[in-house]
Amino acid sequence: MSDSDAILIVGGGLGGLTAALALGRQGRRVRVLEATPELGAIGYGIQLGPNVFPMFARLGLVDALLAQSILPRACVMFDALTGAEVTHIPNDPVLRARFGAPYVVIHRVDLHKILLDACRATGTITLEPSTSVVDYTQRDDGVSLTTEDGRKIDGVALIGADGLRSLVRARIANDGEPKPIGYVAHRTIVPFGEVPQGVQRDVSALWVGPGFHMVHYPLRDNTLFNIVAVFRTDTHGDKGDSAFNASEVERTYATAHPVMKSLLEKMDLKRRWMIADRDPVRHWSQGRVTMLGDAAHPALQTFAQGACMAIEDGVTLAAMVDLAKGDFAAAFKRYEQARVVRTGRVVLEGRRLWQGYHAEGIDRDVWLQAFAERSEADVLACLSWLYDGIRLPVQDTGSDKVSA
């Protein structure tokens, strides 16, 4: 099998590596082309819902995932002004009983390494860092990529796993820049021992407030603590220094509960991220070219499903290629049809829920009361469309129910 027989994947993130692994396990030649010098993630915490576990079961990675994860006691929503609990979902055994798997949190670096190690152990996968792709063309029998340093790389198909500002999406959807929503995020990981008193450390917490929210949860066997502070600001497009950012955070969270303020004091405010998404599109593919993850359907963080959707994409895509016996154009169309409504729902329902999280005035009072009136059964029913996961069009090698 020659290099020109390989499936080319642009982007070595979670979705790209999942697709590479699932395709490589079929015996297909795969080349993962990553622009950065190292195929190693940097970042913070990731939340993984029960729907991702059947994907890892299919790849034989459930034990590896659980070994690096934490199962929070519950997912809890707090009122950011009063500190009152709005609602909570017990994790294990409630989620496992209802959806066949728990909810876990994991450091992005650890999740990335699990997939990288599995790819490196698969002889048909090549990982190629420092390979920035700037253009591509396709023929009836394959594709050809051009790299930033002028190299040509040929393959039988192309998968764009190249993120929010995807080259592949620019060619297929041509829908311009991502849409900023007027919010920014600060992210920090602190040693577990530095978490202030009064903070519930064993849950995945969401504090909802007027124009702001905060998320926190433990990582790495309760040695680290992940904190994310998000808020609306007119300066979302500006790059302020630490003093500017600190001043804005102090002003924005002036009415926040003391527990939130104690966590803000621990945060590194040197860097912030502007939050953006894109409108869903129906068509992700052209012939032998398709895309996945944030390239295809970037969503707000409302459902904490960015990684899960990318992983579902990668496994589904490989299943469709296997089913089509190498007819990539047909496989990519079937993959697109299988994924577009589910991922579009994550985007659109995520936007609506985002509005509720950050509502103000009487809108906030009404939203909080309505949410607080939901029973545990109501909340689980509302999540069933998401956490029940997906069914693939080929025979599974194992059960969809996962035991840990």
Image (spheres, grey):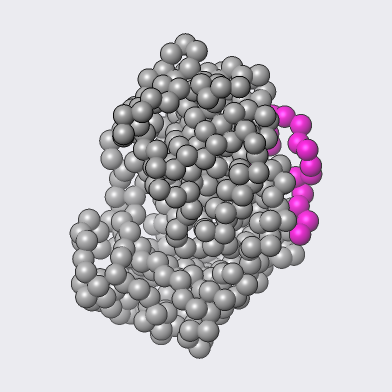
List x then y, in percent, for residue 103. 64, 60
- Evaluate whether residue 321 shows in this view: yes
Bounds of the magenta span?
Answer: 389-404
Image point 65% across, 36% down: which residue? 123
The answer to which quarter of the image holds residue 372 is bottom right
Image point 59% across, 36% down: which residue? 125
- Evaluate whether residue 309 shows in this view: no
Q: Out of 377 and 182, give the one closest to the viewer.
A: 182
Left or right: residue 400 versus residue 190 is: right
Viewport quadrant of the C terminus: bottom right
- Taking the magenta stretch, the answer to whether it contains residue 245 is no
Q: Most extreme residue toward the bottom, as rendered?
A: 197
Please name the predominant secondary structure of the magenta segment in the image. loop
> Can you say whether 323 is above or below 296 in the image?
above
Left or right: residue 371 versus residue 149 is: right
Image point 53% across, 74% down: which residue? 224
The answer to which quarter of the image holds residue 26 is top right
List x then y, in percent, for residue 97. 76, 58
Q: Out of 207 and 361, give the one closest to the viewer.
A: 207
Query: How many numbered markers are drawn?
Result: 0
Q: Most extreme residue toward the top, as rendered?
A: 140
> Can you say whether 355 is above or below 75 in the image?
above
